[in-house]
Image (cartoon, rainbow, N blue to C red):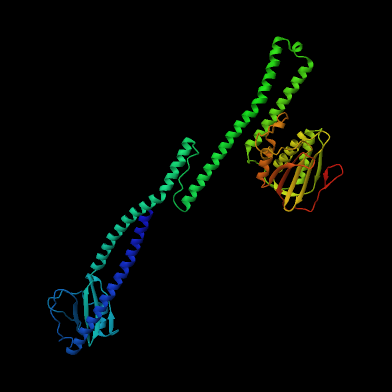
Amino acid sequence: MIAATAIAVSVFVSFQVASELMDRKLLDAAEDQLHADSRVLATNAERAGLAQVQLPPYPGSGRLVRVILSDGSTRTPAGQPALPPVSEQAGRVAEGASIDLLESTDWNEGYRVYTLRVGDGAVQVADLADDSPVNQFGFGMLLIGLLCVAGGALVGRSVARAALAPIDRLTAAAVHVADTRDLDADIPDEGGGEIRQLIRSINDMLAALRDSRQAQRLLAEDAAHELKTPLTSLRLNVELLIRLDRRGTLDSSLPAESRTRLLNDLGAQVAELSTLAAELTEVARGDVSDESTELIDFADVVVAAAARARSRMPDIEVALDVSSVWVSGRPAALQRAVLNLIDNAGKWSPANQPVHVRLRAVGASAILEVDDAGPGIDAADAPRVFDRFYRADSARALPGSGLGLSIVQRVVDAHSGRVTAGRSTRGGALLQVGLPAASPPTGSQWFTAGNGTAVR
């Protein structure tokens, strides 16, 4: 419709311009012919006189002539149709009152009349105003315009359907995905330009959705597996207490020492479930967070995480050696990552050996190192320590969910950093985090006090 309308407007404008030009051209040609014929008649009239000049009989078609005498009377050829009466302007030309030559166009009764002063009178040459050539031209243009509009509509429809065919298939594929939830149906990469780019973008989106759904499924399966063991143990212990209580043999069948051990076991299992639920929530949230990114001193984050770790593990000493390094990030997420690193080191560090936490600027990066004096990470386990729910065989008996280092990996990745695991000089594990450093807003610096606390 747009193509047909554009062609129709173009044809109409072209017709109007061409008709106007053609009409002017024909009018100029007719007036030139009248001028030439009048001069021939004027030459003959000057030789023979206006009253005696021979006026050939009217041939039945063509130009019309008339002689205006000095008394205002007129002479016309025999058999010639009557011309309109002599106009006032033509009479003044014949009388010589104004100018010798006056060109006038008189459209009354469809005549064009040219008046030329000759002697004491004038001669006139006229012809019928014939608009048939313009009308025929307009009719031809109308037919051509209609054909162009019809052809433009057909061609425009064909081109539009061919161009929009990939969009139709894209729409059908999107409807199929919405109806069936089948994310494996890639859309054929066809078309060109923006359409091909759109199809590729949607295919990339479907691939991302497939990966997200696969990760969600794996998370659910791993979570179910990890929850199974503590829930089973918790249920068995609770069922044992309920059964003994119903029989009234709780005190006799379960000595105080065993009861205390059982209650402690229940408390530990509940704490483990609470920790696992919190970490599952953190992992399930992914990168979605309401916390905004801001310019922070990473040393503040590390000091706050160390304080929380001391309250959670009072038996483990945390030795700080930090200096001021500014980064752009989310404070709460970074603090959670640092706390997980310290908690992980605290689980392995002997009671008489501190967990060392160091922060310094190296080039354009902020480098955080957390190491312990434990048994370290086996070479076979190093590539997988940051996987979700992965726990080395030596860590099965220790509390934890296997999600702590996975959360660290996700937070560091979200801040365009890197995290690696290796062996420290003390023989234990060395976990190193590198984040892009930022320019500090002030010149404040940190230094480490003798008790291992970082102060300004």
Q: Residue lying furthest right in this view?
A: 450
**Looking at the image, which residue sits at the far bottom?**
47
Give above or below for 51 relative to 231.
Answer: below
Which residue corresponds to the image point at 76% horizontal and 34% vertical from the top-left? 348
Residue at the limit of the structure toward the front, as seen here: 379
Front-most of residues 33 and 11: 11
Toward which corner of the image does residue 389 lie, by quadrant?
Answer: top right
Query: Which one is in front, 355 or 269?
Result: 355
Q: Quadrant of residue 15?
A: bottom left
Q: Is residue 297 visible?
A: no
Is 332 located above or below residue 195 in the figure? above
Q: Is residue 5 above or below residue 66?
A: above
> For the image shown, how many numbered marks are present on the structure?
0
The residue drawn where x is 34% and y is 64% is 14
Q: Name the spot of residue 388 as percent of width and height, x first.
A: 65, 36
69 lies left or right of 164 = left
Tell me which residue sits at (75%, 45%) in the image: 368
Q: Is residue 114 left or right of residue 292?
A: left
Residue 184 screen position, x and y as percent:
49, 39
The spot of residue 83 in percent (x, y) is 19, 75
Q: Is residue 17 visible in the rendered structure shown here?
A: yes
Rendering quarter of residue 56: bottom left
Residue toward you, 127 or 256: 256
Left or right of 200? Residue 335 is right
The answer to whether 320 appears left or right of 240 in the picture is right
Q: Residue at x 46, y 36 (%)?
A: 179
Q: Position of residue 94 (x, y in %)?
A: 24, 83
